[in-house]
Image: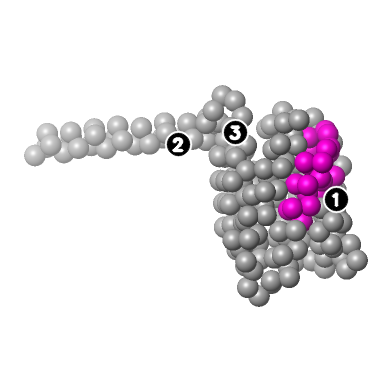
Amino acid sequence: MKQTEKKSRRYLSKLIIVFFIVLIASLYYKGCVHRPPYDAVKIAASETVLWKAYYKGEKKKLVWELVNLHRTQFGMTLLEALKVSKELGEAAYIFSQVKSDYEEATLPYLRKAYSSIREYRNENFDVEAVSRAELSWWIARRTPGKNSPEQVGAEIANLYALLYGETNPDIQRAGYLRARAACLRDQQESNPDWREIERLLRESYKALVKGVKQ
């Protein structure tokens, strides 16, 4: 009996060791040596889930979906994705709660998030300019006279130009289609057509992929 208990304890100890090895690997291993392929279909599906969580005020779901997006699509480690997602999630949640002083309330979190993204992705974009461009299209959507798909789309395209260092008709189209998806959500606030919203987002990210590869 004692011998059986010893074997069980040894087996359990080995399982615990294996568990911690897997855990540590998941925290620090990036999944691929190179950046994972940019999958427009998966990103559109993920953003649709993010938007649903945002408008329902589901902060935890918002953050964890961001974690999943950063892990699977942008090759971040779990720790990196958690940090960036928490900062972006905080920015989005705070913006949803305030009606004025957007920069004071939201920009600090956007700056932190984009600083982390620049570091983890080895990018060289201007953190301040990108953070302000992100906030700018959020604000435009709330501002009568500035919230048409064309106007908001131009703001999003400007964000892409700052992030990727270039602009072209495909990048501009990507901004417009994403803005159309957001506008549709606003027009159908009580019962959004999420299938159509996801379709627009999918076409938007396909255009962005094409534009960035030019």
Q: Which of marks 2 and 3 is nearer the N terminus?
A: 2
Element under label 3? Answer: loop
Amino acid under disc 3: Pro
Q: Is residue 171 a member of the stretch shown in magenta?
A: yes
Task: Inspect this view and state whether residue 127 appears.
Answer: no
- Residue at the spot 83% in from the left edge and 33% down from the top edge: 165
Left or right of residue 101, residue 179 in this image: left
Q: Which of marks 1 and 2 is nearer the N terminus?
A: 2
Horizontal and vertical percent position of residue 92: 72, 57
Residue 37: name its quadrant.
top right
Q: Earlier in the sequence, mark 3 or mark 1?
A: 3
- Residue at the spot 62% in from the left edge and 37% down from the top edge: 38
Q: How far apart are marks 1 and 2 (CA)?
A: 43 Å
Disc number for residue 37: 3
Residue at the extreme bottom of the image, as rendered: 190
> What's the magenta bit mostly, secondary-structure-wise?
helix
